[in-house]
Amino acid sequence: MALWGGRFSQAADQRFKYFNDSLRFDYRLAEQDIIGSIGWSKSLVTVNVLSIDEQKRLESALNELLVSVRDNPEQILQSDAEDIHSWVEQKLIEKVGDLGKKLHTGRSRNDQVATDLKLWCKDEIAVLLQAIGHLQLRLVDTAEHYQDTVMPGYTHLQRAQPVTFAHWCLAYFEMLARDKSRLQSTLARLDVCPLGSGALAGTAYPIDRDELAQNLGFVCATNNSLDSVSDRDHVMELLSNAAMGMNHLSRFAEDLIIFNSGEANFVELSDKVTSGSSLMPQKKNPDALELIRGKSGRVMGALTGAMITFKGLPLAYNKDMQEDKEGLFDALSTWHECLDMAHLVLEDIQLNKQVCLQAAKQGYSNATELADYLVAKGVPFREAHHIVGEVVVAAISEQKALEELSIDQFKQFSQVIEQDVYTILSIESCLNKRSAKGGVSPEQVSMAIKQAKDSLNNL
Ligand code: ARG
């Protein structure tokens, strides 16, 4: 039976009922709805709506229901209840009879759904923080393993300066650290409880809302009832966190897809995360990474969708708000799935160290070193930059690396170049010199690895 039949004489059209009902997706809020209901029943004792004994009977029936939905959440989908709130109330009435009908006193589905969803978001944030931390750990381990694997670093997708694979891994570690801190700050803002705001104007029962909030694990109760029932900032924030997180994972995927291409051949992906072609027997495609990149689109779309849905809503609750859930559930589970998949890709990745090194040596990625060398010998940087440009042109025409030119050839461009130039043109020297904080020098990278590990241990 619907929760609101009294005023109606005609049954709802079946097509409208299907369109309006939310049980098929909000069944995921079952646990939160039951926990919220237990909290509410305790508050009803304090305002003499329920006796202590009645509350105990309700609580134990709700706890039984909790165990049963944890065990088998799919059972909920068999029901034709309108939404999860109706379903829980129906089940409660089945268990304890008329006493179950008292639970909704002073409460509205508007403050109820707002509370359920916040409780759900809090649980989900904890799960996502763990998944991100897990991937960070994998990145640090991979970095540690490939500390001496030199590869080209790029700007404009042109070889720019040598870096190490470890340094690349740690770049993604940093992005993930920011993703975590964004989730934590979203959590801090959403951790206020809307329950006890009624439909929009506040509850007519003088309950201690802060106590109720704390019973449910929130920091305190919300300030304004109109805002409480219509605030979905946390949905948009979480979607924005997810969109940003997916942006990072998508770039991670794109980098590895390039590194895995036949042209680069820097990395070998495991058979576990690649698939073949039905026609071309030689193919091994990076599907896991392509799907991570691809799925980022729909997560970003969910953010856009939510922003547009909420932007025109007058205060307070409007049914449009029911649209907050499907996009959020889908986006957060997609993000989680992609974090796990990125982890799986890294588990068995193999670097072709020699190919990476050769590529780093090509492309004149030590040209900046030569310019710095000239500067050290007193040539102004702008002039040095120009001279090196000419040296590069000459080397290209001879199909040689800079370090393969003879001293005589160098001297045609600048008399200050001596034998010691060959040391500074080496890859080791390129890396070692970048020893300021955040640079690619081996000692900076190993310090960064240590710091990264410490930050994970201090969770
Ligand atoms: N299913 C609804 C939602 O998700 C619950 C709140 C319904 N409130 C109402 N006044 N009809 O938003």
Image: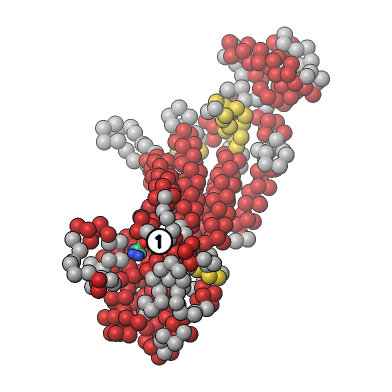
Res. 358 visible in picture: no
Q: Measured from the top left, where is residue 190 in percent x and y?
A: 52, 62
Q: Position of residue 410 (x, y in %)?
A: 71, 13
Q: Quadrant of the N terminus?
A: bottom left
Kind of element beneath mark 1:
loop
State whether residue 301 is above or below residue 406: below
379 sits to left or right of 452: right
Q: If the picture is divided into quarters, which one holds ligand 1?
A: bottom left
Residue 288 lies, in percent from the top left, at 39, 43
Q: Is mark 1 within 8 Å of ligand 1?
A: yes
Can the viewer see residue 304 in this picture? yes
Task: Determine whether 367 is above or below 243 in the image.
Answer: above
What amino acid does circle 1 point to?
Tyr
Task: Residue at 29% x, 33% y: name it.
Answer: 281
> How many numbered discs sit on the rendered protein?
1
In the picture shown, does residue 372 fall above or below 239?
above
Disc 1 marks which residue? 317
Mark 1 Cα within 10 Å, few/some/many (few <14, many 20+)?
Answer: many
